[in-house]
Image (cartoon, rainbow, N blue to C red):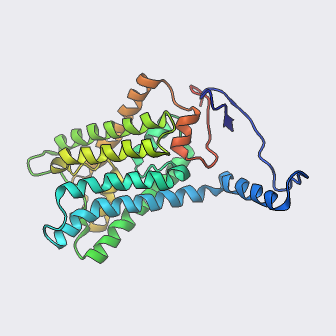
Amino acid sequence: MTVNPGDDHEFTDVELPSSSDTTPLLVPAEQRFARMVHNFEDPAQEWRRLCAELLGTFFLVLVAAGGPMVDRAIPGSVGRAAAVVAPGVMVMAVILFMGKVSGAHLNPAVSLAFALRRDFPWRRVPAYLVVQIGGAVLAAWFLQVVVHVSASWGSTYPAGRTSALDAFLIEAVLTLGLVSVILGTASGAQQVGLFGALGVGGYIALAGLWASPLTGASMNPFRTLGPDLVAADLADYWVYLAGPLLGAVVAVGVAFLLRGPGGGMSGSLAAQGTIRPEITRPGKP
């Protein structure tokens, strides 16, 4: 499917060239290039998006969990400000280098929000979640092997004076803000470019600066689950699962109030990348 660039709500069917096309106007080299592009955009090439999500989540957790783990191994080597700003900068970099391939979700709360907005097909959500978990676990395991401290030091937990309920509410509100920024930049297809990268990365860094002493400012169930699984310690994990998921659902409601239904061209491009996105008419399944 493709959409009139001037209107997110109008779209027309188009036929992609088949591998048997022999257009006489194309020289052989141009024909081969056209076929290569067609094959790359084939929905059967979903593995490209999944590889991007695996790699992106790996690097996110590598930085987010790596800071506190290295600081534990070498006390005083990584300050709190650096530890919380680094994940935001990494997300910024990941969006820039692979946002056009997979949408750079890196977070099940983001995948859920895009699916609820009808910017991302539900049938593709399970595979995204699997590779996100895989990337998070692989990063935590790698850190534990090379840094030689337990992956539990790279996870997130409520602080001593923060109850589990307080932590749940903080994570929900933090994720509400994060997903609102993501959906807001996606409404202009900016999440696949510089503006989305700056907005999302900047929000993660700023949220971490004030909230990390309370909850670790995870905002991502799998960023916490990866180190927890490697360390075999799931204490209070429900906080980092339920809080972000609730925040994501509320953010979808806020996006509807501010911008109406999703499902248009710009949101689909941001959620799915530019490799043959599936675009639906707003308000239709």
Q: How many marks?
A: 0
Q: Position of residue 45 (x, y in %)?
A: 64, 57
- The extreme left residue here reads 161
24 to the left or right of 46: right
Residue 186: tell me if it is visible: yes
Residue at point 59% right, 59% down? 47
In this rendering, position of residue 160 left or right of residue 243: left
Q: Which residue shows up at 13% across the image and 45% down it?
A: 163
**In the image, residue 273 lies at what x, y percent?**
55, 47
Q: Quadrant of residue 272?
A: top right
Residue beneath the point at 28% across and 62% down:
65
The vertical placement of 52 against 201, above or below, is: below
Q: Nearer the viewer, residue 164 or 194?
A: 194
Q: Is residue 235 visible?
A: no
Give x and y (percent) for residue 142. Answer: 35, 72
Quick check: 210 left or right of 137? left
Rendered position, 71 above or below 163: below
- Residue at horizontal 33 percent and vertical 49 percent from the top: 220
How far across and how far down the image is residue 250, in percent?
A: 35, 32
Q: State the residue lying farthest toward the right.
A: 24
Q: Which quarter of the image is occupied by the C terminus?
A: top right
Q: Along the line of sight, which residue is nearer the eye, 214 or 181? A: 181
Front residue of 264/250: it is 264
Which part of the image, by quadrant, shows the N terminus?
A: top right
